[in-house]
Image (spheres, rainbow, N blue to C red):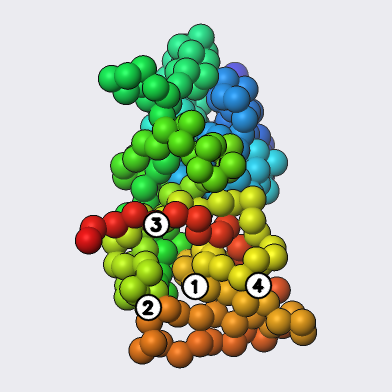
């Protein structure tokens, strides 16, 4: 029997939080093991592979919105993924779901599903980094490979918001982005992240390390990013296709 006069030893809050994070990482790794790769699960969830890898290492935790998106994509309950509550998911079913073609059309041609996030990328004054996807759009695997010479898993989908890139990119246009091109080695249109904003601009790198962000719309002036500030710029990828209404 416990003596009420003797205080009960409790684990420090840091230890409890550490154990909960370790449990989440273990469950996340269990889910990832059912997918062809962690990067594929990350992109299907609408999360950058680099951010996803931080979750796997226990260096960061997903926000509630991203946790919900991750659980929905993986086909597990939020309660189990976050806290280990409830029954463990059927791993056999998860494996079959993750490794099957993303979608099968009437002609039995596999499609690659790309998440379409609501906020998009700014072709104007700047918008916050987008939140998890609310819908998906399918592109044929063979079309992506033959047209762009890229594996479907290396291509993501963005939506342009604003008019600064008109007439070539309009408000609401869909953009396919090649995430393997992240070095500005070619002068072209890139999606970049800088100080919590996600932008789509023509980018020119100068010899001193500075960047020039160019808008196609003549009403917008080019902006020069100093070499020091350019180090904060994260390149999401180069825009290789646009689609929109006429």
Give the labeled residue for mark 3: 242
Earlier-in-chain disc, 2 versus 4:
2
Can you see residue 219?
yes
Circle 3 crowding by C-alpha within 10 Å: few under 14, some 14–19, many from 20: some
Name the residue nearer the viewer: 16 or 86. Answer: 86
Quarter of the picture holding the C terminus: bottom left
Circle 2 crowding by C-alpha within 10 Å: few under 14, some 14–19, many from 20: many
Residue drawn where x is 41% and y is 64% of the image? 121
Is label 1 in a helix, a strand or a loop? Answer: strand
Q: Does the residue at mark 1 contact the one at mark 3 (Cβ under 8 Å)?
A: no
Q: Does the residue at mark 4 contact the one at mark 3 (Cβ under 8 Å)?
A: no
- Residue 49: x and y, percent? 60, 45
Earlier-in-chain disc, 1 versus 4:
1
Between circles 2 and 4, the one closer to the viewer is 2
Quarter of the picture holding the N terminus: top right
Q: Does the residue at mark 2 contact the one at mark 1 (Cβ under 8 Å)?
A: yes
Spatial CA span between label 2 and label 3: 15 Å
Between circles 1 and 3, the one closer to the viewer is 3
Spatial CA span between label 4 and label 3: 27 Å
Residue drawn where x is 56% and y is 68% of the image? 188
Is label 2 in a helix, a strand or a loop? Answer: loop
Q: Does the residue at mark 2 contact the one at mark 3 (Cβ under 8 Å)?
A: no
Circle 4 crowding by C-alpha within 10 Å: few under 14, some 14–19, many from 20: few
Task: Using the image, tell me which numbered label, if any, was put on residue 84.
Answer: none
Give the labeled residue for mark 1: 201
Task: Using the image, tell me which numbered label, if any, was put on residue 164.
Answer: 2
Spatial CA span between label 2 and label 1: 9 Å
Residue drawn where x is 45% and y is 21% of the image? 101
């Amino acid at each position: 029997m416990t003596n009420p006069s003797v205080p009960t030893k409790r684990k420090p809050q840091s230890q409890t939080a550490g154990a909960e994070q370790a449990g989440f990482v273990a469950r996340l790794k269990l889910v990832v093991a059912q997918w062809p790769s962690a990067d594929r699960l990350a992109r299907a969830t609408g999360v950058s592979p680099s951010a996803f890898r931080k979750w796997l290492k226990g260096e960061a935790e997903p926000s509630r919105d991203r946790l919900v998106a991750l659980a929905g994509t993986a086909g597990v309950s939020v309660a189990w993924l976050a806290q280990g509550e409830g029954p463990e998911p059927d791993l056999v079913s998860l494996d079959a779901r993750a490794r099957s073609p993303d979608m099968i059309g009437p002609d039995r041609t596999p499609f690659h599903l790309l998440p379409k996030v609501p906020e998009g990328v700014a072709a104007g004054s700047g918008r916050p980094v987008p939140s998890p996807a609310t819908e998906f759009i399918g592109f044929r695997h063979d079309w992506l490979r033959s047209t762009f010479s890229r594996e479907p898993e290396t291509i993501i989908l963005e939506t342009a918001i604003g008019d600064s890139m008109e007439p070539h990119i309009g408000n609401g246009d869909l953009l396919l982005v090649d995430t393997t091109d992240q070095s500005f080695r070619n002068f072209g249109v890139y999606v970049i992240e800088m100080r919590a904003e996600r932008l789509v601009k023509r980018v020119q790198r100068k010899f001193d390390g500075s960047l020039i962000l160019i808008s196609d719309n003549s009403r917008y002036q080019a902006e020069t990013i100093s070499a020091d500030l350019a180090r904060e710029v994260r390149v999401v990828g180069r825009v290789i296709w646009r689609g929109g209404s006429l």
